[in-house]
Amino acid sequence: MKTKKTTTKKRVPKTKKPMKTIIIKREDTIKEFDFSFKDPQENLKIVAILKDLQTHEGWRFMQEAFQKNIEFLSNQILDKEDALSGKELTEEEVDELRMKRSYLKELLEKPKYFIDKLEDKPAQEDNLDPYD
């Protein structure tokens, strides 16, 4: 009687393929949207919604949070020092903080920006006549 030799297969974990790095250029991700509709009534509705947003408690809380973050970033930019660790910041790190601060300021102004874009304002012609 012959005995079969049993063999066990060793499981080898499958290796994952390395992830590809995708580089996204910032200027390609920024797009100016045209929110003005052909119907002026629709514009008025959107303006009313945005004005309601500006008076809402939630937006006021967000404004306060953004303002505190702006102040925190401004102090770090002026001191050129990380407020949490105390380490000195490089110029690149300071520039990054400036960009974050600028973005927060832009966010604070977004409702007003869209209201100004959508409100029906009569176009005023520039008067270039110096004697008028």
Image: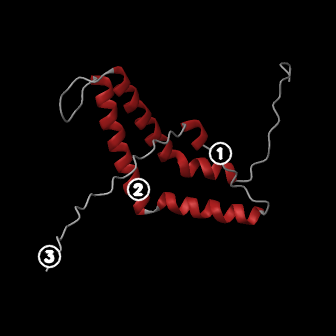
* Residue 9 in the figure: left or right of residue 38: left
Q: Amino acid at mark 1?
A: Glu
Q: Residue 42's quadrant in the figure?
A: bottom right
Q: CA distance from mark 3 to mark 1?
A: 77 Å
- Foreground: disc 1 or disc 2: 1
- Foreground: disc 3 or disc 1: 3
Where residue 100 sits: x, y (%)? 41, 37
Mark number for residue 3?
A: 3
Other residues around mark 3 within 10 Å, as few (<14) / some (14–19) / many (≥20): few
Secondary structure under badge 2? helix
Picture residue at 37% right of the left edge, 24% below the top: 92
Where residue 94 sits: x, y (%)? 35, 26
Q: Which residue is mark 1?
A: 32
Q: CA distance from mark 2 to mark 3?
A: 82 Å
Extreme residue toward the bottom, this view:
1
Quarter of the image that includes the C terminus: top right
Q: Amino acid at mark 2?
A: Arg
Q: Is residue 16 above or below residue 82?
A: below
Other residues around mark 1 within 10 Å, as few (<14) / some (14–19) / many (≥20): few
Q: Which residue is mark 2?
A: 60
Secondary structure under badge 1? loop
Picture residue at 44% right of the left edge, 33% below the top: 99
Q: As rendered, which of 110 and 32 lies closer to the eye?
A: 32
